[in-house]
Amino acid sequence: MTRKKNVLLIVVDQWRGDLLPILGTPHLRTPNLDRLCAEGVTFRNHFTQGAPCGPARASLLTGQYVMNHRAVQNTVPLDARFTNIALELRQGGFDPALVGYTTTTPDPRTTSPDDPRFLVLGNLMDGFRPVGAFEPYRDAYFGWVASQGHELPANRDEIWLPEGAASEGSGATARASRIPKQLSDTAWFTERALSYLRGRDDKPWFLHLGYYRPHPPFIAPAPYNAMYDAADMPSPVRAASPAEEASQNALLRHYVENVRQSSFFQDGKKLASEMTDAEVRQTRATYYGLMSEIDEHLGRVFDFLQATGQWDDTLIVFTCDHGEQLGDHHLLGKIGYFDESFRIPMIVRDPRAEAGATRGSVVDRFSETIDMMPTVLEWLGLPVPRQCDGRSLLPFCHGAPPADWRTEVHFEFDFRDVHYSKPETALGIPMDKANLAVVRDHDYKYVHFAALPPLFFDLRADPGQFENRAEDPAYATLVRRYAQKMLDWRLGFADRTLTGYRASPDGLQVRVGPDAMPAAIRPSSR
């Protein structure tokens, strides 16, 4: 008898890829993720294709580089012609459920300009069935909190502030948020997931389980606020002063001189670049606490799957949308071109026997967020659309990585003006040239700007990426080679949705790529 197949896709928010105990993070306590790593494969060099949330999640859920899906910033629409993992699952007979959010702005050509979805940062991607939606207004979460007898403040976001704090906050803090742990957003997401799973009975399922943390505000409920000592946290990797940091590049200067703490601690008084070493360490201690809170709740989900006999029927993928600067390079947030904003976690647990030999292993080869969709579709036996730029990670779980696997990663960042950030205007750069693209391997990193001078880093000699070698004559040949790599990448991955089709005297013919599963021509899922 064929066993049923379930998929649990866990998507956390703003979790740096280097912060997992299996990768050597000191002090971080995540016993349930440790358990997942012990039974799965962890990808050490896994990168998102974009930041912030909107473009990152568009890449995750469509399998495309940002240069193809073009939802380049939060609030920028996603073209309705593209399929996504939820629509592909529906084609395969699955009912994709979602707890959390996707930060997707709809295609304005498919709806009215008065659609309320254009009033918010992002809404839900087409195809998912929400069973615990956080976006766009967090109404379901706040309503649940109120239903538990907890009085909401006039400004509902103040539930995350410490008790007795003024609305402007006080910066990095070890004080607990006023919301008790049993009513935190992390608890709510978990309750929604467990309610859905209990209701499925014995039917197969796919669940996108999203968590808001460790996204700011960096204020944790008790006891997670006091779980880590700031003195044990590493100091930030940054230049001796914000001014020295800012001298590297005009975009970096803009962020060093303009990113405020208000989005991270609900404190608008200071710049992020003004944080002291002690303040950064405290921020990291709180950030670790938020991670441990997620881990504790994941343990509830994992225990449920084991208790109900579903653990060995379920593919589990743990990943993230983007990273977090966390004080490195005098920055907070997910911006620019540094690895801290783009390297993210990826753990894949294939429960089948053929994955037994790789359990607990760590892969050093480069992987990308676009690989998630092909991985899940292959595991379910569904065709991978030619639209997808990524490749399945299952061969790594089965101990047979492809010989032609990628040797580098690519990511992009668009800094055009949106309602809450105006770098395009500040730098005097045209909207469609306010962007950059990165090619990075183990040795070098090349950053190409459409309207600013390039950057080139020798990662062997300068892992912190402080010395720009783009104009150094000793690196001229390497700079040219990596610029050519960038061009090769764009030529090879430009949108190819229909490029496998062709007319012929014998009628329509279809050619698929080496990793695509041949499929009959079918009507668009759009």
Image (cartoon, rainbow, N blue to C red):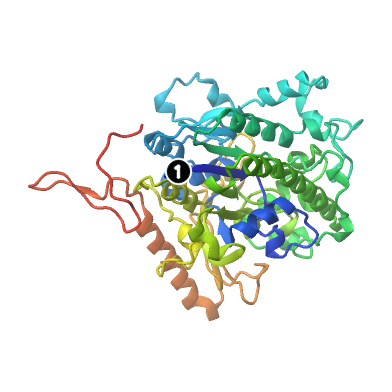
Instruction: Say which residue appears at 45% left-offset and 43% top-offset.
Output: 62
Instruction: In the displayed orientation, state which residue is furthest to the bottom.
Output: 474
Instruction: In the displayed orientation, state which residue is furthest to the right.
Output: 164
Q: Percent x, y for residue 323? A: 64, 51
Q: Percent x, y for residue 313? A: 53, 45
Q: Nearer the viewer, residue 519 or 121?
A: 519
On screen, 266 above or below 240?
above
Q: Nearer the viewer, residue 321 or 262?
A: 321
Query: Where does label 1 land, which residue?
Result: 62
Q: Specify whether 298 is left or right of 403.
A: right
Instruction: Say which residue appears at 78% left-offset and 24% top-offset.
Output: 155
Q: Quadrant of the N terminus?
A: top left
Badge 1: how crowded within 10 Å, few (<14), some, or many (20+)?
many
Q: Nearer the viewer, residue 6 or 292?
A: 6
- Asked whether residue 251 is in view, the answer is yes
Name which quarter of the figure residue 422 lies in: top right
Q: Quadrant of the C terminus?
A: top left
Q: Percent x, y for residue 83? A: 39, 38
Q: Percent x, y for residue 456? A: 56, 68
Assign a secondary structure to mark 1.
helix
- Asked whether residue 437 is in view, the answer is no
* Figure label count: 1
Q: Nearer the viewer, residue 354 or 466?
A: 354
Name which quarter of the figure residue 196 lies in: top right
Q: Amino acid at mark 1?
A: Thr
Instruction: Say which residue appears at 69% left-offset and 62% top-offset.
Output: 22
Q: Specify whether 78 is left or right of 239.
A: left
Instruction: In the displayed orientation, state which residue is furthest to the front.
Output: 1
Instruction: Say which residue appears at 49% left-offset and 46% top-offset.
Output: 59
